[in-house]
Amino acid sequence: MLVVPTTLAVLLVLISWQVATDGPLLGLDTGTRHAVHELRRALHSTLVNHLGAGLSDLGGAVPAVPVLLGAAGLAAVRRRDAAPSRWWLPLPLAAAAAVLIPLLVVPAKAWFARPGPYGLPLAPDQWGWYPSGHTATSAIAYGTAALLLGGTLAADARLVLYTCTAMLCLGVGAGLVWSDYHWLLDVVASWCLAGLLLWVAAALVRRALPRVPADGERPPPHWGSG
């Protein structure tokens, strides 16, 4: 059960160490950037470039945080019958996730102060590129939204929601690298960070919020208003 979070934590520490010491693993960044540039030149597609930029924009606080809060509100309403005394819990959980994003990402950006792919020195008002804020925002916000809403859906719908959410978050990261907005390791580190937070969030949701039964499905016997 702890294999996934342990792997994510080790990978996050490894990448952070390499960024802090300008280690050899950063060659993966430059190699990936070169390969992306070659592919971009080969395709020479304005449509693909716009798609990459559009996917990147989905990692901004707008629209990610409003989607998170909206999903939490919908999840709360859908849980009113299954958990009369705890139906409102998705709202503070969503708010906590939204607050955690800048609290974790901004200090890390300021501490590592990593220049972006273009290699320009950081301006006085810039925090740095590591880890990727857009990647963390998208993965944490959309991931938490999916967890909160997924428990109110039937199994098939829940699987579709989780799959689409994962694809969206992967798309945001790919768009950031494709558009030269971030190094690859900036994105991977944020995925690791988000994965750790979502692992904790999933455990909290399982303990605090009952799953809403699908039509014709009987709720587990331990559900109740207490």
Image: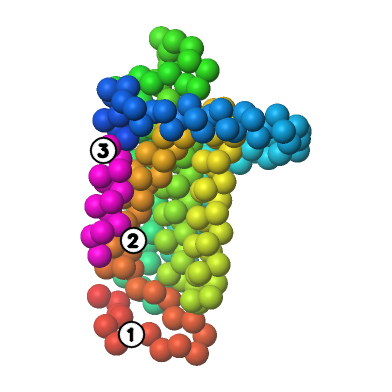
Q: Tell me which numbered mark, 2 or 3, is placed earlier along the sequence.
A: 3
Image-based side of 83 in relation to 35, left or right:
left
Q: Quadrant of the N terminus?
A: bottom left
Start-end of magenta stretch:
1-14
Label 2 – label 1 distance at C-alpha? 19 Å
Q: Is residue 8 magenta?
A: yes
Relative to 50, does residue 118 appear above or below in the rendering?
Answer: above
Task: Tell me which amino acid carries mark 3.
Answer: Val
Disc 1 on helix, strand or loop? loop
Q: Is residue 165 magenta?
A: no
Whether residue 131 is visible here, answered yes or no, is yes
Q: Nearer the viewer, mark 1 or mark 3?
A: 3
Residue 39 placement (x, y as % from top left)? 65, 35
Q: Quadrant of residue 12?
A: top left
Name the residue beneath numbered marker 2: 202
Q: Quadrant of residue 204?
A: bottom left
Label 1 – label 3 distance at C-alpha? 40 Å
Residue 51 placement (x, y as % from top left)? 68, 40
Name the residue beneath numbered marker 1: 220
Task: Tell me which amino acid carries mark 1.
Answer: Pro
For the residue carrying disc 2, how many other residues have a C-alpha within 10 Å: few (<14), some (14-19), or many (20+)? Answer: some
Q: Nearer the viewer, mark 2 or mark 1?
A: 2
Q: Which mark is residue 13?
A: 3
The reply to whether discs 2 and 1 touch (Cβ–Cβ < 8 Å) is: no
